[in-house]
Image (cartoon, coloured by chain):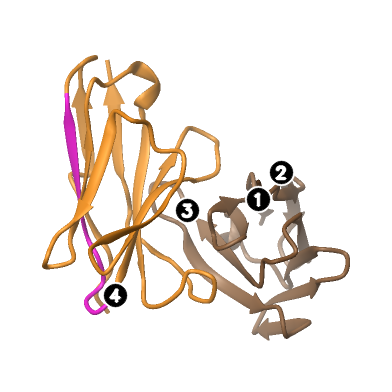
Amino acid sequence: GENVEQHPSTLSVQEGDSAVIKCTYSDSASNYFPWYKQELGKGPQLIIDIRSNVGEKKDQRIAVTLNKTAKHFSLHITETQPEDSAVYFCAARNQFYFGTGTSLTVIP
Amino acid sequence: AAGVIQSPRHLIKEKRETATLKCYPIPRHDTVYWYQQGPGQDPQFLISFYEKMQSDKGSIPDRFSAQQFSDYHSELNMSSLELGDSALYFCASSLGDRDNSPLHFGNGTRLTVT
C-alpha cells in the first residue's frame, strides 16, 4: 500500500518566520497532492493543493512544491501568524492515505 | 457557502451497543467519504460512495456498514461497539474524482464508547 511520511511531527516557529513541512510518498501513480489544516475541534480544511503536472503553486503566504522524481512535496508558510497554529496533513494516492500530521505552533 | 453537516456532534455509547452517524454532503457533491481519526492520529479512510454506490473501501471493520441514500446523505452504522472505536468520525464530500478534487470535511462526530 501507499506510505506517506510527513516531517516534522511538531514545529515551533517565531511569528514572522517561515515554516516548511515535507511529505514523501511511494506510489508513483499519485498525481494529486493536497494539504489540509485542522484546527482543534474541527475537520480538516484544504489550504492548498497541487497536481502532478505543476512543480509549484503559491497562494499568498502559502506555497506547495512538488518533486515527482523524488516523490516528495512540501508546504511552505511564510510570515507565519499565530492563527497558523494548527495540525497540518498532507495526502496522497487518491487521498486514501494521509500523512501523520505536523503540529505547528507559531509563537507570538 | 453550505458545508458538510454531521450529526450528532457528540455520542456516548456503551460497549456492545450500536451507533448511527449521519452526514449531509455539500449540495451537488456526488461523492461521500468516511474517515476515522483517533487521538493524535491522522484520518484513516473507511469507505466512500459515488452516486449512492459504494466506490472504495478502506479499513472499515466488518461491524460497521454504511450507505448513501437517494438524497445523497450518508449514514455510518456501527454495531457491537468496542472501546477502541472511540474516535472522531469525519464525513467529507467532493465533486468529481478524489484523485483530482479536494475533500470538504464536516466537523466530525466524537464517539465515546464506555
Q: Which mark is residue A105?
A: 1
The percent coordinates of residue A61 (x first, y second) are 67, 78
Residues at discs 1 and 2 in contact (Cβ within 8 Å): yes
Q: Which mark is residue B63?
A: none
Q: Which of B9 and B78 is in front in this view?
A: B78
The residue that mark 2 highlights is A10
Q: The orange chain is which one?
A: B
Are the residues under marks 1 and 4 on the same chain? no
Question: Is residue B19 one of those drawn in magenta?
Answer: yes
Q: If you read the primary sequence from the N terminus, does the residue marked by circle 1 or circle 3 appear first? A: 3
Asked where in the image residue B3 lies, by quadrant, the reply is: bottom left
Mark 4 is surrounded, within 10 Å at the Cα level, by few (under 14), some (14 to 19) or many (20 or more) other residues, namely some
The relative height of residue A31 versus residue B7 in the rendered view (above or below) is below
The span from disc 1 to disc 4 (Cα, nearest Å) is 34 Å
The span from disc 2 to disc 4 (Cα, nearest Å) is 34 Å
Screen quadrant of the N terminus of chain B? bottom left
- Chain letter of mark 3 equals A
In front: mark 1 or mark 4?
4
